[in-house]
């Protein structure tokens, strides 16, 4: 059976990823996966072999060092890196991550890079039924017509839920993920980047299924 080391940007992403792994794949935390949230996205260091700056705790700040550190992982273990593309080009961002990984002489042997387009909140915005089930008073008519578009995803979700953007913080995002993710359609996800995340995990699980 596979064991996944999941690297995320922050605490607000944890409920979504945990729910997806449990509901869709019947994986159990600490038995089949561990989740490691960071303090934001950060930036890849210019030198991927450099020692990470302890003051910069973003996912990308720490990523090369962590991938180097995971070189000891045995067969059956895989590192999953989930990054928001924000306003970056998702194809270019993923290639940058792959290039940084390839530049490491010693690294984890199994790594899956996945991009949330635009943010994990975009996964929620794409599923009107999930939002309305979790929040019956949500303003569904204000949802975007297309999934995975760069519109300021968490700000749009706040608007749909009737929240003032200036009053929202990480605890609100955590609560939204906790409430909405259990309602997401994971069999036919409406967000292409959520579908890509699920398909990637599915391939890993299948490859290591005894």
Image (cartoon, helix red, strand yellow):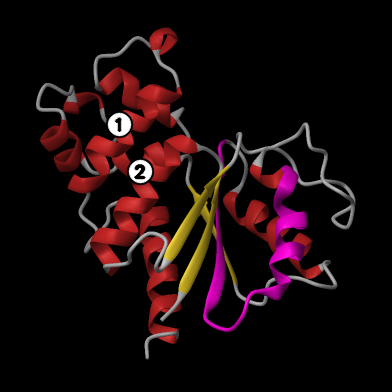
Q: Quadrant of the image for the N terminus? A: bottom left
Horizontal side of 182 relative to 108 (left or right) equals left
Q: With respect to residue 133, does 48 lie above or below?
A: below
**Residue 176, disc:** 1
Label 2 Cα crowd, 10 Å radius (few <14 / some 14-19 / many 20+): many
Tell me where residue 130 appears, x and y as whole percent.
Answer: 18, 41
The answer to whether residue 37 of the structure is visible from this angle is: yes
* Magenta segment: 61-86
User: Toward which corner of the image does residue 15 lie, by quadrant?
Assistant: top left
**Residue 15, disc:** 2
Q: Looking at the image, is mark 1 or mark 2 earlier in the sequence?
A: 2
Tell me where residue 201 appears, x and y as whole percent.
Answer: 42, 69
- Element type at mark 1: helix
Residue pictured at 61% horizontal, 47% vertical: 89
User: Toward which corner of the image does residue 197 lie, by quadrant?
Assistant: bottom left
Single out the residue that lies furthest toward the front: 30
The answer to whether residue 147 of the structure is visible from this angle is: no
Tag 1 and tag 2, C-beta contact below 8 Å: no
Tell me where residue 119 appears, x and y as whole percent.
Answer: 47, 39
Q: 95 or 63: which is nearer to us?
A: 63
């Amino acid at each position: 059976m596979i064991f996944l080391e999941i690297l995320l940007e922050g605490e607000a992403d944890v409920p979504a990823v945990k729910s997806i792994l449990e509901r869709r794949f019947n994986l159990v935390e600490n038995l089949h996966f561990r989740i490691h949230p960071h303090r934001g996205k950060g930036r890849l260091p210019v030198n991927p072999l450099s020692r990470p700056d302890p003051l910069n705790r973003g996912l990308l700040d720490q990523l090369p060092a962590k991938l180097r550190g995971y070189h000891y992982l045995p067969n059956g273990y895989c590192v999953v890196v989930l990054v928001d593309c924000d306003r970056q080009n998702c194809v270019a961002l993923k290639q940058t991550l792959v290039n940084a990984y390839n530049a490491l002489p010693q690294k984890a042997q199994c790594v899956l890079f996945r991009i949330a387009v635009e943010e994990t909140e975009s996964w929620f915005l794409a599923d009107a039924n999930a939002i309305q089930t979790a929040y019956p008073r949500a303003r569904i008519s204000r949802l975007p017509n297309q999934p995975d578009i760069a519109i300021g995803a968490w700000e749009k979700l706040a608007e749909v839920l009737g929240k003032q953007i200036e009053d929202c913080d990480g605890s609100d995002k955590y609560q939204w993920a906790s409430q909405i993710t259990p309602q997401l359609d994971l069999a036919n996800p409406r967000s292409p980047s959520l579908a890509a995340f699920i398909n990637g995990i599915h391939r890993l699980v299948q490859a290591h299924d005894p």
